[in-house]
Image: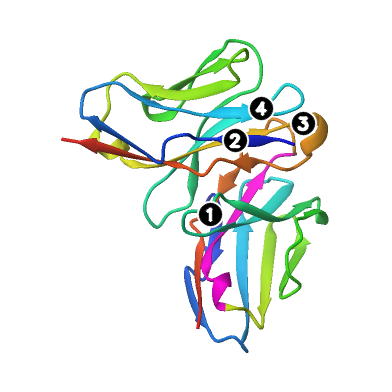
């Protein structure tokens, strides 16, 4: 069965410092991996995805993520955090051979960026 | 209007009421979804429609009844809900099931008294 783990409920970082939000996954085949962000009282917004190819994918707002097959990880990164990056971040996985239309989400990691 | 639009944004209902949540997508997508977001829980997939046919139904209680009259509209009909059904209900759409990311509406915040 497919699953996603976000080991940190909260990440705190100072503005201007690099940030990392961790994600590990478990699927039976080759996964499709996604990151979404949710601001207060809003729906989720797509940030980036890994389908195939280059392990480093770049997305919206300067975010990037690295797919690591051996570690089954897909950590979200940004070189220099902004206060406006403070939000709830969700990692998600889809396992095309078995998952069909199911996108499974992690529990979310709250990012606080301090000025 | 663009994207995915959900109405109402907020809904308060009693346990004996009947109400509906509406979702409309203007993206030309062919799949639509209902997710439930409760505090401190992962998003729960409730229903998926592809080309107006239900393709996923994740053991959701019958007091929730989805309807997809066409590829642009999705409804969630609510009847005799329980207080534990209070949550943010998110609608999403995608182009197909494989590589397409989900586009979410802003959600309908439901409170059941």
Percent across and percent down for residue A38 are 43, 46
Q: Is residue A98 magenta?
A: no
Q: Are marks 3 and 4 on the same chain?
A: yes
- A90 above or below B110? above
Q: Which region shows up in magenta?
A: B83-96
> Closer to the camera: disc 4 or disc 1?
4
> Closer to the camera: disc 2 or disc 4?
2
Q: Residue at x 71, y 76 (%)?
A: B63
Q: Residue at x 55, y 21 (%)?
A: A73
Residue at mark 1: chain: B
Q: Are marks 2 and 3 on the same chain?
A: yes
- Quote the CA–CA distance across marks 2 and 1: 23 Å
User: Looking at the rendered structure, which numbered label has been put on residue A96?
Assistant: 3
Mark nearer the N terminus (3 vs 4): 4
Q: Which residue is mark 2?
A: A4
Q: Which residue is mark 1?
A: B105
Callout 4: SS:
strand
Callout 2: SS:
strand
Seen as rendered, the residue at the extreme front is: A7
Callout 3: SS:
helix
User: Looking at the rendered structure, which numbered label has been put on residue A32?
Assistant: 4
């Amino acid at each position: 069965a497919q699953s996603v783990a976000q080991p940190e409920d909260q990440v705190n970082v100072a503005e201007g410092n690099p940030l990392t939000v961790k994600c590990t996954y478990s699927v039976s085949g080759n996964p499709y991996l996604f990151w979404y962000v949710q601001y207060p009282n809003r729906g989720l917004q797509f940030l980036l995805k890994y389908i195939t190819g280059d392990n480093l994918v770049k997305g919206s707002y300067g975010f990037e993520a690295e797919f690591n097959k051996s570690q089954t990880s897909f950590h979200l990164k940004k070189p220099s955090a902004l206060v406006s990056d403070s939000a709830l971040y969700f990692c998600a996985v889809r396992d095309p051979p078995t998952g069909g239309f199911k996108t499974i989400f992690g529990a979310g990691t709250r990012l606080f960026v301090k000025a | 209007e663009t994207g995915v639009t959900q109405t109402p944004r907020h809904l308060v209902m009693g346990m004996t009421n009947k109400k509906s949540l509406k979702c409309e997508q203007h993206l030309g997508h062919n799949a639509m979804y209902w997710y439930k977001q409760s505090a401190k829980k992962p998003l729960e997939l409730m229903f998926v429609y592809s080309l107006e046919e239900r393709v996923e139904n994740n053991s959701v209680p019958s007091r929730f009844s989805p309807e997809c009259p066409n590829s642009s509209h999705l409804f969630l009909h609510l009847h005799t809900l329980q207080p534990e059904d209070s949550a943010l209900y998110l609608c999403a759409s995608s182009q197909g099931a494989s590589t397409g990311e989900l586009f979410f509406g802003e959600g309908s915040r439901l409170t059941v008294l």
